[in-house]
Every structure is written in C-alpha cells, then in structure tokens.
Amino acid sequence: MHDDVPQGRRILRRRSLLQGLAGAAAGAAALSACAGGDGPRRTDSVRIILGHGAAPGNPRSDGALAFQRLVAEQSGGEVEIQILGQESVGNDTEMMVSVAAGTLDMSINSQGPFSSYVPEAALIGLPFLFESSAHAYAVLDGALQDTIAARAEEVGFHVLNLWDNGMRDISNSVRSIASPEDVAGLKIRTPDDPMTIDIFGELGANPTPLAFGELYLALRQGAVDGQENPVVNIKSSSLQEVQSHLAVTGHKYEVNPFVMSTTRWKNLSEDIRQVIASAAQGAVEEQRRLMTEQTAAIYTEFEQILEVTHPDRAAFREATAPVAERWQAEHPDFFDQITTAAEAIRAEHEEQPA
C-alpha cells in the first residue's frame, strides 16, 4: 500500500519509472543493433511493456502472465512482454493517460478510466444489465466489442479484447444490507467510473471515487465505510480483513479492457501483431476461467467469515431504474444496441429457482 507517500510524489516516481523504461528500451534496442554475435537479445527482438493494477493471484495478474508466456512461445522468444503490475506505473487512470501518450505500450485496465475516452463503454455497467459473467460474454464477444473497439481506435487505443472484471457486490463495516434503503448514507468507495457513481448516488449512498491501491487503508482507517467489487478483487487485496458485511447484489458487471497504444500497434510488423492478437485471445480465455473458478470458491469462504446477505435483486433493479433512463438519453443508439442484445438471451442466463 502507499501509507505515507504523498500522491504527488507517487505520480512523479511513476512518471520517472515510465521515462526510465522508455529510455532503457531505446538504449537496449540501440545496443543490440550495434552488438554482434552472442548478445543476450537478438537485434530484431521486441520488448513491450504491459501495466496493470491487480495484485498477484488475481485473475488479471495471472492472465497477464499467461499472455507473457504465450507471446514468448508463439514468437519463438522474439517478443518479450515486460509486466509491471500492482499500480507500479500508476493507477488505472494514470496508465490510460500513459498509453494514450505512448509512454506505456499496453494496459489491462478498468472500465471506468477507459470510458473517459470511450463513453459508450460505461453502458456495459448499466445496473442489472447482465445476469452473470457468462451472459455478458455472450453479448459482448461480437458486434458490441467491435463497436467499442472502433470508437477506441479513434482516440488512440487498440482494443485486443475485454477481460472479465466480474459481477459486483457490496461490502461494508457498518451494517448488513437486505434492501436498497440499507445502502443509504453509507460512504462507499467507487472506482473512477461515472456509471458506478451514478448508481450509488441513486441509492442514497455517498459515492467516493478512490484508486483501488488506496482502498485497503481507507477501509482500515474508516475513511470510507465500504466498497463494491467482484469478490475475486476483494479476496486478492484482502479487503475482507477490514469489512464485516457482504451483500451479494450483482448490481453491475464490468470488463477489463486490454488495450495497446494505437501508435505502438501500428509500428509493429504484421507477424508480431498476429502473435499479440493470438496470445491475447488465449489469455482472456485463461483469465475468464480463473475468474469463474475463484469466484465460486471465494463465495464459499466468505460465507464462513463475513455476514453475507442475498438481497432481492428486483428491489435494487427498481431503485436504480432512473440511472438507466439517464444513460439512455445520453447514448440512445448504443443503449438500444446493448440492452436489446442482453434482453434477447436473458432467459438463457437467468438463475432457475430450486
């Protein structure tokens, strides 16, 4: 965590690290071009820097490692992916800025910061749009992703694919949540995501945007009462240690967009682009598998250590309906596209009564 380091100093350190990495990569390329014979890197090798904010053991972190391995295998070692995780080169918002500026090659990022560049992407998180992650995959892996990717390309991001950031639940240290009224008045940390802020504002909470890397300390010190995340993120960052209640609301779904600087992508050879695209597909499949397995196991574990409630989703859906209406007015075409696609297969993904 970043207990006593001022935010400004952290940003300067991250910028220095990115600048140093860029300089080191350029220097390595120059040296390898001049060196002969048996140097540690071939003269035509490529190094690509990948940043993310996840903790070790999180499926996003493990998916990044799978991507690194697949790229090495499929390129015969000619492409090296250097992973910088745990917000070591900035939080998600800062990493998006760095990718846009070309000082960071790639990021497995978060939906909120991505939607500041591609506003339509925020609608993936419409309240209760999806019944499950599998429902979301079925909707997003196709024309919807193509629409988002085309818009992202216009603003400097090449979208490789959309990783699973899960169905989101609410935890807090104040009281159990059985109804929307129980959320009112709670100070809830949210990501820097306008949709999430809108949802919790509608529920009467005090939504408080905060970088994920600062969340554990904020919860421990009582700066915020609670937060909302998929349980995989709660577990991998040990947030259950500083929370006592979990409400399984599944109030929204989010993706982790896997993006690359459009400039960097265009400067790669076609062969390397094919390797990157193929490895990204293998990695998203691995990441989604891990999310599914870990989510089931963590729910079982949390039932033993937290007070877990299962509120009526219909009541929460009704309470947050004005949120969808506002976003429909703002993005009518994409709203119709994504809600129509989700509704068309909803029955296939609804949980059947026992």
Image (cartoon, rainbow, N blue to C red):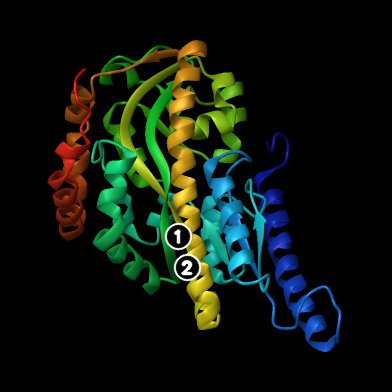
State yes or no: discs 1 and 2 in contact (Cβ < 8 Å): yes
Residue at horizontal 26 percent and vertical 59 percent from the top? 144
Where residue 110 sits: x, y (%)?
A: 46, 49
User: How many numbered tags mark residues here?
Assistant: 2
Label 2: how many residues lie within 10 Å, few (<14), some (14-19) or many (20+)?
some
Three-letter amino acid code at the position of disc 2: Ala
Which type of secondary structure does the marked residue at label 1 adopt? helix
Residue 54 point in image, percent of width and height: 58, 44
Residue 271, numbered label: none
The image quarter containing residue 154 is bottom left
- At 68% from the left and 36% from the top, the residue drawn is 1
Q: Quadrant of the C terminus?
A: top left
Q: Which residue is mark 2?
A: 277
Q: Secondary structure at mark 2?
A: helix
Give residue 281's mark: 1
> Left or right of 157: which side holds 348?
left
Q: Is residue 304 above or below residue 11?
A: above
Left or right, residue 156 beside residue 131: right
Q: Nearer the viewer, residue 228 or 143?
A: 143
- Residue 233 in percent (x, y) is at 51, 35
Q: Residue at x 50, y 80 (%)?
A: 266
Q: For the residue marked with disc 1, what is the amino acid?
A: Gln
Q: Is residue 339 left or right of residue 100?
A: left
The answer to whether residue 226 is visible is no
